[in-house]
Amino acid sequence: MSKYVKEMMTDDLSTKWDGVEELMLVSFAGMEANDTVELRKRLRGKNIHMMVVKNSLARRATEGTVLAPAFEGAQGAQAVVWGAEDVVALAKEVIAVAETPQFKLFEPTGGVLDGAKLSSDEVKAVSKWPTRGEMLSTISGQIMGPAMTLSAQLLGPAKMLASQIKQKSEEEGGEDAGE
């Protein structure tokens, strides 16, 4: 491959990964072509991109970026996977695909998160974290919890008093009806 072509490919990769801060490296060597097509469809449906890229080109394209640690020491045929709602959703999908019998040759080999290199075990650990949506739900529950408790405590005695007044008036109304 000529130097000019390598530079064009490196520039293309740099453009594609512009703004990407986390990605995963996966191995899927030996998968049949039909399974690879199904895998790409599945990932595309979750807004996840997958690209097979030569390690040396990826190193050049990510040089000086937060993605560079992912390719340090990378060897063999690998694919780069990025996208999804957040890095946790990406890791969850990568692990879910790896655990699918149809894609048994697909396995995470590493990645990068916040500029730090991830091992395959760390990718599995990240997949167990709550997603952004789950975290927002938990936080909003924690914010709303005290307010809801206070509201219940303020309204509780008033509801009891109103119930007792209603009951008393019904009792007195019943006595008047009997006379």
Image (cartoon, grey):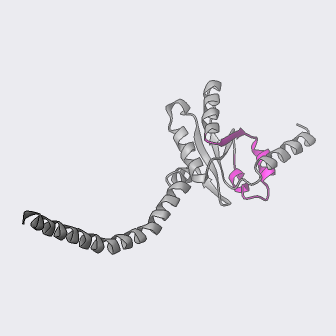
Above or below for 152 versus 43: below
- Of 138 and 161, nearer the camera is 161
Tell me, yes or no, if residue 35 can be seen here.
yes
Q: Residue at x 38, y 71 (%)?
A: 151
Residue 55 lies in magenta, yes or no?
Answer: yes
Tell me, yes or no, if residue 130 can be seen here.
no
Residue 98, x across and y down, in percent = 54, 39
Above or below for 90 versus 66: above
Q: Residue at x 7, y 63 (%)?
A: 178
Residue 143, x across and y down, in percent = 47, 68
Q: Is 142 left, or right, of 13 in this rendering?
A: left
Total numbered labels placed on residues in the image: 0
Instruction: Please state, as top left, top right, bottom left or bottom right, where the N terminus lies in the image.
Output: top right
Region rendered in magenta:
46-74
Residue 173 lies in magenta, yes or no?
Answer: no
- Of 147 and 133, nearer the camera is 147
Residue 39, x across and y down, in percent = 61, 33
- Of 16 and 10, nearer the camera is 16
Q: Residue at x 53, y 44 (%)?
A: 95
Q: Is 120 left, or right, of 21 in this rendering?
A: left
Q: Is 56 left, or right, of 42 in this rendering?
A: right
Instruction: Please state, as top left, top right, bottom left or bottom right, where the C terminus lies in the image.
Output: bottom left
